[in-house]
Amino acid sequence: MVAALAALAVIIPVGPGDQAWRALLPQLNFLPEDAEVCVVFSQKSALPLADEMPQLSAKITCITATTGRARQLNAGVAATRNVELWFVHADSVLAANTAAALNCALIAKSHSNSLHYFDLRFAKDGSRKMRINEFGVWLRTRLFCLPFGDQGFLLSRANFIRLGGYDETLPSAEDHGLIWHAKRAGMKIRAIGATLSTSARRYAEFGWGKTTAKHLRLTWQQARFFAKRAP
């Protein structure tokens, strides 16, 4: 397992005021010393001091990039060298089988032309109705091969470069754009066989029905936008 995971570069974008990365980094202690973890902040003032960082076997680098998740993600890729890329949102919570699932995906022969994703779970900071949202995400990914960035994209650096990276001209939905590019390039969109959990706080704050309807509307609008783009 160590040999496959040693090829990983984990890219973690951090937005203004976000402190969730502090809970995420200790969960990456399964990574071997040759793996890389790059935390990309959008503000220089948010860069942590050296003694604030957890002790991991993997090399941890903290950098800043111009505001915008696409720019942050691309900057993280540029700041690392390993041949496999794993994009993880700062508020993600890993599962017990994350390391094993990553290892299996990396050593699979099909990985060379694939983009893998995790199944999404919501934390208990939302209502029980979030189980409906989880099922909706499962349907969207299985029926339409359309995972989103909070599902932890895993792909090779070579394929990422071939796709042109994240589109920095998009004001949002850079993850949606990458998936469409991958599908048009003939890449397989595959479930990795493990889950990533994320916060449901926005649903609790703004209301489950209102927030769910907003996300459905945005997903439909984004799908129409990218479907109309030339291959």
Image (cartoon, rainbow, N blue to C red):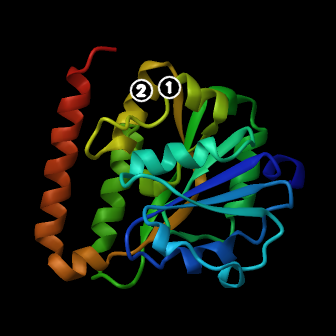
Residue pointed to by mark 1: 163
Q: Where 168 falls versus 24 (above or below)?
A: above
Q: Amino acid at mark 2?
A: His
* Residue sitting at the far top: 231
Q: Where 13 falls versus 46 (above or below)?
A: above
- Asked if the residue under mark 2 is in contact with the one under mark 1, i.e. CB atoms within 8 Å, the reply is yes
Q: Amino acid at mark 1?
A: Leu
Residue pointed to by mark 2: 181
Which numbered disc, 1 or 2, marks the residue that appears first in the sequence? 1
Disc 2 secondary structure class:
helix
Residue nearest the viewer, comparing 229 with 64: 64
Numbered disc total? 2
Q: Residues within 10 Å of mark 2 (few under 14, many from 20)?
A: some
Q: Is residue 1 left or right of residue 15?
A: right
- Residue 104: image tag: none
Q: Quadrant of the N terminus?
A: bottom right
Which residue is depicted at the point 48% across and 74% down? 46
Q: Is residue 229 visible?
A: yes
